[in-house]
Image: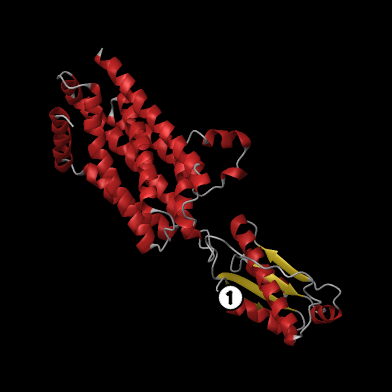
Amino acid sequence: MNRRLIGLIRKEFIQIVRDPSSIAIAFALPLVLLLLFGYGVSLDAKAVPLALVVERPDNSSQDFLSGFYRSEYFTPLRVATLREAQTLLLAKRVQGIVHLREDFTRRLKKGDGVLIQLIVNGIDANTARLVQGYVTGVWNQWLERRSLKMKSSSILPIEVEQRIWFNPEVKSRRFLVPGLIAVIMTLIGAMLTALVVAREWERGTMEAIMSTPVSIGEILLGKLIPYFLLGTGGLLLSVAMAVWLFEVPLRGSFWLLWLASSVFLLVALGMGFLISTVTKNQFVAGQIAIIVTYLPAFILSGFIFAIHSMPTVIQWITFLVPARYYVAILQTQFLAGDIWPVIWPNLLALTGMAVFFLGRTRQLSRKRLE
């Protein structure tokens, strides 16, 4: 490393210390966003209020309904009539109704099909699907227990043995937090270079640096290395919070995770460089950085919304979003481990994007010097 480059890096670090906004973006932003989303956003449904209506209570119906009282997913409320339960559903005091008709036990003993009516509030479609699945689970577990108790296999002609890989407790936080790290790193990387470099363009200090004998490559490296190290600090903070605060297991190699994160950070920094080079204005650069990096990373990366369920045209657009590849790597690294068929294609895509954004930035900067 030559002396001019070392001098540029030293100058950049001094500027970072004098202006703590960059440090705040690198460390305070992931801290706040992780706490906000980690604790505030959950796709789980727990303690769902559920009305239980039994037209003719007996031992069988009581035994079946006891499963709802033992489940952490429900807060059961015993209601005398179906009309009263429907009133509670309309008033949003319950999210669903389990209705057992008077012939429940008779049809159960005869084995000619037991009719259980389940009414679910479909306004929140996600919660409705979860409630439907949970009620089906309680029913299947009760049938299994009853079958074992009666030493009969007639009720369950097919026994389903379930195995949930990688996230056996089915906690949505373990799925969301790795994706959230990708969104945060996108925002940090783009904002660091977009705002800080644009500020230098506004103040005229960038032109002053370009008028010196230093090459454009040295100027870009002098900017890139300090903010890369700053972004790496934010990444380590995010990973530490994911593992120790939110208890998301890191099953893959830490060094492979660091390598993939470094490549992605170069992509984000490169996007910020390109935005600041084109706009040369802090306000415009900040607005564009949020629109072209943060929003696509949040909506189109697979962080919350499944890409395969999007329209085909939108799925094609997601291939242009770098966070899509990083989210796939992070979720695999954290929950499954080093799955190379997943990691390699996504890592190569990120490498290509990093080369494109940094190369394009250098090309445009050289044109400005001419």
Residue 129 position by quadrant: bottom right
> Which residue is depicted at the point 33% across and 35% down?
269
Q: Secondary structure at mark 1?
A: loop
Question: What is the number of callouts on the image?
Answer: 1
Q: Nearer the viewer, residue 259 or 219?
A: 259
Q: Amino acid at mark 1?
A: Ser
In the picture provided, is 314 more to the left or to the right than 259? right
Residue 45 position by quadrant: bottom right
Q: Nearer the viewer, residue 312 or 221?
A: 221
As drawn, 137 above or below 307: below
Quadrant assignment for the C terminus: top left
> Which residue is depicted at the point 37% across and 53% down?
254
In the picture provided, is 246 more to the left or to the right than 220? right
As drawn, 84 above or below 168: below
> Which residue is depicted at the point 28% across and 25% down?
280
| Residue furthest to the bottom | 59
* Category of crowding for the residue at label 1, using alpha-carbon neighbours closer than 10 angstroms: few (below 14), some (14–19), many (at least 20): some
Kindly tell me whether residue 54 is visible in this rendering: yes
Kindly tell me whether residue 196 is visible in this rendering: no
As drawn, 222 above or below 22: above
Q: Nearer the viewer, residue 27 or 50?
A: 27
In the picture provided, is 316 more to the left or to the right than 297? right
In the picture provided, is 26 more to the left or to the right than 243? left
Residue 36: x %, y % from top left: 38, 56
- Which residue matches tag 1? 71
Residue 290 position by quadrant: top left
> Which residue is depicted at the point 67% across and 79% down?
65
